[in-house]
Amino acid sequence: ETGVTQTPRHLVMGMTNKKSLKCEQHLGHNAMYWYKQSAKKPLELMFVYNFKEQTENNSVPSRFSPECPNSSHLFLHLHTLQPEDSALYLCASSHSGYEQYFGPGTRLTVT
Amino acid sequence: KQEVTQIPAALSVPEGENLVLNCSFTDSAIYNLQWFRQDPGKGLTSLLLIQSSQREQTSGRLNASLDKSSGRSTLYIAASQPGDSATYLCAVTGQAGTALIFGKGTTLSVSS
């Protein structure tokens, strides 16, 4: 598979559940990103990883925990979420800060 | 703090029209600017990337310009088609490998 893939595409979870979102890039990029898109708000950054090291954290609550085991994989671990965390979560990758390529997103609903 | 504004928020045009989408940003110290397309409920498709040293980029019927000193970019779509209907997002980054700052987008509807 090419490009940036994300799984699952849709996720419904209760506030006490623990789940993980997965992102994989097949482009040989060295930077990976998590963004959140809520209704009526601009896309906003959550985390940036460069060469597996976290370089930006946009004041994200600790109930969101990222993990980047290598330059091709990025995870977002979720626990004790709130209904307002329901959103489209998008992963992106780039090479040395050039053009960012996005995955299809995971539509998360917290009940 | 960088802010990106897109005008108009929504636009409806008949098929065949040429149109311009506007993007402005408050801090001219950008590394690059990207235009994206997003279909409802889907991820983002990159349309054009303009480096800070460039003035414009073209791809097919799309042309994006950048005036860094005035903090403005435009996306020109020639001979619009119903398949162009989508939300168009403008985003800038301040340094290589850092986050994109997005506008809220312009939702375009092209009627046949």
Image (cartoon, coloured by chain):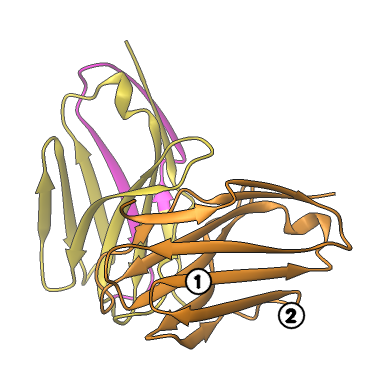
Chain colours: A orange, B yellow
Q: Residues within 10 Å of mark 2 (few under 14, many from 20)?
A: few
| Structural distance between the alpha carbons of marks 1 and 2 | 17 Å
Residue B30 in percent (x, y) is at 28, 76
Q: Amino acid at mark 1?
A: Leu
Residue B3 in percent (x, y) is at 45, 68
Query: Which residue is more in the foreground, B85 or A46?
Result: A46
Q: Nearer the viewer, mark 1 or mark 2?
A: 1
Query: Which residue is more in the foreground, A69 or B35?
Result: A69
Residue beneath the point at 50% across and 35% down? B40
Q: Is B12 displayed left or right of B61 in the figure?
A: right
Q: Main secondary structure of the magenta part?
A: strand
Task: Say which residue label 1 marks.
Answer: A74
Which quadrant is home to the C terminus of chain B? top left
Q: Residues within 10 Å of mark 1 (few under 14, many from 20)?
A: many
Task: Say which residue label 2 marks.
Answer: A62
Residue beneath the point at 11% across and 38% down? B60
Q: Amino acid at mark 2?
A: Ser
Query: Which residue is more in the foreground, B19 or A61?
Result: A61
Residues beneath discs 1 and 2 located on the same chain:
yes
Q: Is B3 displayed left or right of B70 in the figure?
A: right
Q: Chain of mark 2?
A: A
Q: Circle 1 sits in a helix, a strand or a loop, which is it?
A: strand
- The picture quadrant where one finds residue A101 is bottom left
Q: Circle 2 sits in a helix, a strand or a loop, which is it?
A: loop
Residue beneath the point at 74% across and 80% down? A62
Query: Which residue is more in the foreground, A82 or A79?
Result: A79
Sequence-wise first label, 1 or 2:
2
Residue B65 in percent (x, y) is at 16, 54
Residue B11 in percent (x, y) is at 40, 30
The boundaries of the magenta stretch are B6-28
Residue beneath the point at 11% across and 54% down? B57
